[in-house]
Image (spheres, grey):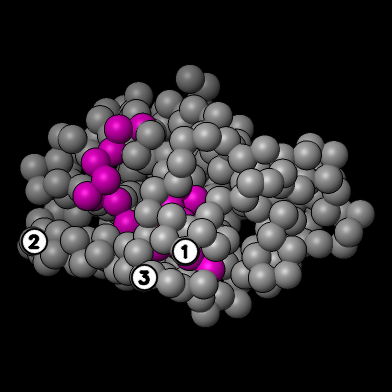
């Protein structure tokens, strides 16, 4: 591995992980970039991944809204169905395995706090009871009619998408109770309809763990979490321990933290080489 100007921060990050008894992993959209997933940074980045939406003048923020499930379900499921198909077809990058190896060495355990809805931590072998998906998951559904407060797993079959228009082809996902339209159990922009009970149950387990590791040496490693939707950054900063912030564009960590202006996989590989 070639020396870089981040040698000193890399050593500091490695020492923080080496000496830790507990590990909190925070992850935003940038975590998936090394797996080949788009990060939707800015309209142009989003439109490179979804050209038809540029012609329609639809940004990520406009599309990630329950409005479309009410007014154009095929467009809504075209967007979310394509994303779910893509996440399922994409293998989590090697950095996930590095993190899992570090986590399993922690005497006081570990937890993942992620805003990603791709379930890639579960795919990479992280135990589901130690993951908070604060914005939900595309692998779970809820009823648009609220005939039930239940949240259920999505079917294994992919959603058929017209690749020219990114519109979904019927039949669309439906509620097993009333037969009406289903939507992903993910938090969208301007979303007062998201059923949060699944994420709240995850948060309860996380809070119990946080209480259990008080007094333990906790390392916090944050990967690819930007400031546009700062949920993960805020949680990692509030953990009150050594923060290792890995972000190629917005790497600045609070005083006492470690800033690494690198992609997730590159930073993890460099730290792991020292461990």
Picture coordinates of residue 178, whole percent (x, y):
47, 64
The residue pinned by badge 3 equals 149
In the drawing, does residue 46 fall left or right of residue 158? Answer: right
The structure residue drawn at horizontal position 62% and vertical position 70%, both measured from the top left corner, is: 66
Q: Nearer the viewer, mark 3 or mark 2?
A: 3
**What is the spatial separation of the Cα atoms under label 3 and label 1, in whole angstroms?**
12 Å
Where on the picture, by quarter, is residue 119? Answer: top left
Question: Does the residue at mark 3 contact the one at mark 2 (Cβ under 8 Å)?
Answer: no
| Rendered view: 91 above or below 8 | above
Per the image, label 3 sits on a secondary structure element best described as loop
Picture coordinates of residue 123, whole percent (x, y):
38, 34
Where on the picture, by quarter, is residue 163? Answer: top right
In the drawing, does residue 6 fall left or right of residue 160? Answer: left
Neighbor class of circle 2 (other Cα within 10 Å; few <14, some 14-19, many 20+) is few
The structure residue drawn at horizontal position 69% and vertical position 60%, both measured from the top left corner, is: 73
**If the image is split into quadrants, where does the C terminus sit?**
top left
Per the image, label 1 sits on a secondary structure element best described as loop
- Which stretch is magenta? 124-144
Q: Nearer the viewer, residue 190 or 42?
A: 190
Q: Nearer the viewer, mark 1 or mark 2?
A: 1
Neighbor class of circle 3 (other Cα within 10 Å; few <14, some 14-19, many 20+) is few
| Rendered view: 238 above or below 170 | below
**What is the spatial separation of the Cα atoms under label 3 and label 2, in whole angstroms?**
31 Å
Q: Which mark is residue 212?
A: 2
Picture coordinates of residue 194, whole percent (x, y):
47, 71
**What is the spatial separation of the Cα atoms under label 1 and label 2, in whole angstroms?**
42 Å
Q: Please identify the residue farthest to the front as the structure is shown.
A: 178
The residue pinned by badge 1 equals 178
The structure residue drawn at horizontal position 85% and vertical position 39%, both measured from the top left corner, is: 164
Q: Please identify the residue farthest to the right as the structure is shown.
A: 55
């Amino acid at each position: 591995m070639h020396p870089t100007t981040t040698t000193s921060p890399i050593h500091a990050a490695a020492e923080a992980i080496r000496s830790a008894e507990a590990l909190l992993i925070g992850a935003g959209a940038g975590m998936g970039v090394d797996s080949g997933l788009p990060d939707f940074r800015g309209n142009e980045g989003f439109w490179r991944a979804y050209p038809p939406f540029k012609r329609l003048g639809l940004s990520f923020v406009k599309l990630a809204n329950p409005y479309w499930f009410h007014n154009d379900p095929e467009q809504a499921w075209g967007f979310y169905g394509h994303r779910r198909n893509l996440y399922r077809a994409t293998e989590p990058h090697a950095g996930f395995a590095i993190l899992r190896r570090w986590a399993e060495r922690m005497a006081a355990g570990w937890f993942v706090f992620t805003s990603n809805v791709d379930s890639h931590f579960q795919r990479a072998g992280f135990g589901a009871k130690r993951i908070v998906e604060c914005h939900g998951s595309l692998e779970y559904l809820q009823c648009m009619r609220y005939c039930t407060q239940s949240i259920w797993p999505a079917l294994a079959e992919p959603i058929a998408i017209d690749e020219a228009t990114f519109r979904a082809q019927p039949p669309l996902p439906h509620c097993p109770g009333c037969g009406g339209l289903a939507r992903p159990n993910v938090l969208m922009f301007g979303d007062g309809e998201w059923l949060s009970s699944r994420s709240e149950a995850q948060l309860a387990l996380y809070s119990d763990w946080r209480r259990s590791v008080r007094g333990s040496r906790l390392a916090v490693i944050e990967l690819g979490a930007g400031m546009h939707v700062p949920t993960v950054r805020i949680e990692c900063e509030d953990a009150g321990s050594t923060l290792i912030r890995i972000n190629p564009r917005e790497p600045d960590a609070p005083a006492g933290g470690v800033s690494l202006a690198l992609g997730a996989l590159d930073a993890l590989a460099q730290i792991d080489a020292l461990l």
